[in-house]
């Protein structure tokens, strides 16, 4: 049995998370900005299907990516250098999270990014905590991703692509932007082959939490990122 969150009850200790399914910690609560910010600062994130209660997770090991370790393939580097696209930050967060919700996923029927989730993260975007990175071609949004930023920690949530490498282009620009801004880690949550191909790796949850605590403690000011903050040419 996992604990049920009532009202403003705190999250249980991470050590109580299940091994199977990996990282399931508790259920219930709400998606208020306060609850979500508290969750992310403690290495916890929501993930559940429509019609289920809210489920909270903290897997062990944890998939992470150091911004400076982002892996660029030869084909992606050629596409980046060609520059036939524009990357923007925080210019259309609702469109990005909606596109992530609508993107088909291998082995998945439907989406976990429900309307309730979209509204919750849009609230966080308005407060300056959630951010989007967008790939535009000929004025059309063709790819991107969104996530959370607290201190100098970035938490990746989801990405989508409607054109070849469009999400990878956004991810590459994000990694470079975060490295330049002094961010120390990107949380990728759970292992996938796609994330591993980009340079992400698994680390023990204890190591993840040690780095997270240090990074979220860095003084900072939440706010909207500059739209052109990542749109620089590649060598």
Image (spheres, rainbow, N blue to C red):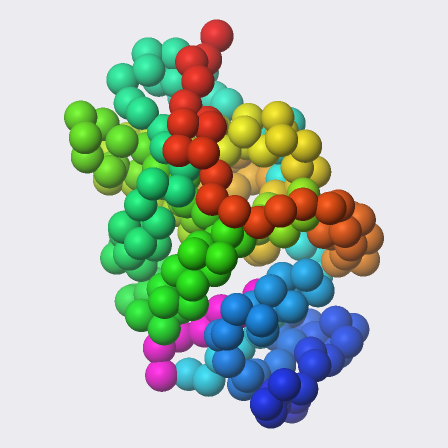
Number of numbered discs on residues: 0
Residue, x 63% and y 62% (percent of image)? 40
Residue, x 31% and y 45% (percent of image)? 92
Q: Is residue 191 magenta?
A: no
- Within the image, what quadrant is residue 185 found in? top right
Q: Is residue 92 above or below residue 108?
A: above
Residue, x 66% and y 37% (percent of image)? 183
Q: Is residue 138 left or right of residue 34?
A: left
Q: Is residue 167 above or below residue 87?
A: below
Residue 209 position within the rendered picture, expressed as x and y whole percent measured from the top left: 77, 56
Residue 25 position within the rendered picture, expressed as x and y whole percent measured from the top left: 65, 77
Q: Is residue 223 above or below residue 138?
A: below
Q: Nearer the viewer, residue 89 or 52?
A: 89
Q: Magenta region: which residues?
A: 45-51
Q: Is residue 159 left or right of residue 5?
A: left
Prevailing SS of the magenta stretch: loop
Residue 83 position within the rendered picture, expressed as x and y whole percent measured from the top left: 33, 15
């Amino acid at each position: 049995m996992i604990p049920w969150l009532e009202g403003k009850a705190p999250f249980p200790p991470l050590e109580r998370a299940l091994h199977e399914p990996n990282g399931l910690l508790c259920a219930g609560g709400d998606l208020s900005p306060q609850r979500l910010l508290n969750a992310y600062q403690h290495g916890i994130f929501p993930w559940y299907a429509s019609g289920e209660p809210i489920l909270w997770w903290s897997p062990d090991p944890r998939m992470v990516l150091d911004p400076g370790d982002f892996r660029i393939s030869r084909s992606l580097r050629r596409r980046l250098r060609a520059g036939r696209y524009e990357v923007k930050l925080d210019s259309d967060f609702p469109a990005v999270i909606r596109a992530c919700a609508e993107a088909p996923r291998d082995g998945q029927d439907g989406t976990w990014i429900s309307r309730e989730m979209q509204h919750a993260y849009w609230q966080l975007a308005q407060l300056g905590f959630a951010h989007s990175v967008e790939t535009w071609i000929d004025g059309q949004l063709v790819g991107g991703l969104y996530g959370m930023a607290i201190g100098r920690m970035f938490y990746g949530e989801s990405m989508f692509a409607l054109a070849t490498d469009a999400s990878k282009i956004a991810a590459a620009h994000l990694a470079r932007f975060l490295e330049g801004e002094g961010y120390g880690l990107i949380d990728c949550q759970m292992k996938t082959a796609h994330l591993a191909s980009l340079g992400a790796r698994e680390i023990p949850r204890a190591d993840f939490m040690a780095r997270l605590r240090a990074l979220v403690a860095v003084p900072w000011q939440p706010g909207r990122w500059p739209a052109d903050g990542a749109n620089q040419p590649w060598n």
